[in-house]
Image (cartoon, rainbow, N blue to C red):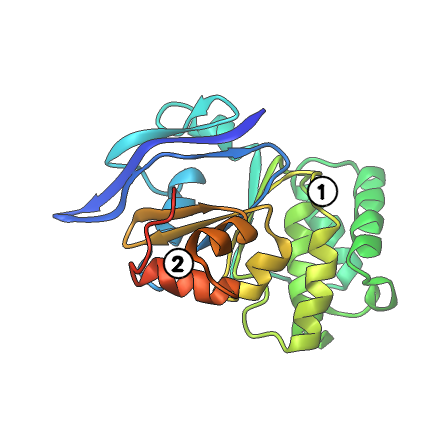
Amino acid sequence: MTAIQLKNLTKRYKETAVVNGLSFSVEEGEFFALLGENGAGKTTLISMLCGLLAPTGGDALVFGDSILTNVDKIKRKMNLSPQETAVAPNLTVRENLEFIAGTYGSSKKEAKAKAAEMIDLFNLTEKEKAKAKTLSGGMQRRLSIAMGLITNPRIFFLDEPTLGLDVRSRRELWSNLSKLKGKMTIILTTHYLEEAEALADRICILQKGILKALGTAEQLKQETNAASFEDAFLAICDGEVESSA
């Protein structure tokens, strides 16, 4: 089933098209990466899909519902983990998770069960009674993402999930995120090319709001005759090749 279908989706600010006629689809259960240099339109695209920003042209369907006419219905199907770590510093790991679950309608029993599931999934057992403010940056990011997932969204947006983390913390989080493959549709934005290559089923490269390339990391390397995905990305962004999009 198609989770997201973009139909000539466009966002303009005066004469500038920040998102310019995008048309592609994301399948249910897919781990999909959005890549692009600063100003590529990634944040604007996600904002429109989340119903935070109205398009100036085109449309997008989320499980068949239009972002133009069914925003409230769409919002109930998704959640977003922002770049900024969003945790309550004076609550413990478990309290943070149970609070969010309760806020989204879970009973106390359900909230406890969901919190336990997230604690196990993100390897937070040893820290479940620790206040969030005492956690390392990597642990706080894990908790923040777990708080987004505890609502059981059908689509989960991950905006720069490992920004600022050291190499070990980044790799540990990759391991956690890889366990989610196939369980929900995940849209990842990142500037770490190796992150997209390691996690994503398919990768979409945007440049100044235009779709430049779309495919698996291996396909994009083959299409650009590149030895590495980084070389492929740079070749596509520099316009050295015209990859099929």
Give the percent coordinates (x, y) of residue 4: 48, 32
Is residue 240 or residue 8 the one in the foreground? 240
From the image, which quarter does the C terminus lie in?
Answer: top left
Residue at left offset 29%, top offset 47%: 210
22 w.r.t. 145: above or below: above
Q: For the residue marked with disc 2, what is the amino acid?
A: Gly
Q: Secondary structure at mark 2?
A: loop
Q: Is residue 33 left or right of residue 185?
A: left
Distance CA(mark 1)–CA(mark 2) = 37 Å
Q: Is residue 234 visible?
A: yes
21 w.r.t. 135: above or below: above
Q: Quadrant of residue 133?
A: bottom right
Q: Which residue is mark 2?
A: 36
Q: Is residue 90 visible?
A: no
Q: For the residue marked with disc 1, what is the amino acid?
A: Gly
Q: Which residue is mark 1?
A: 102
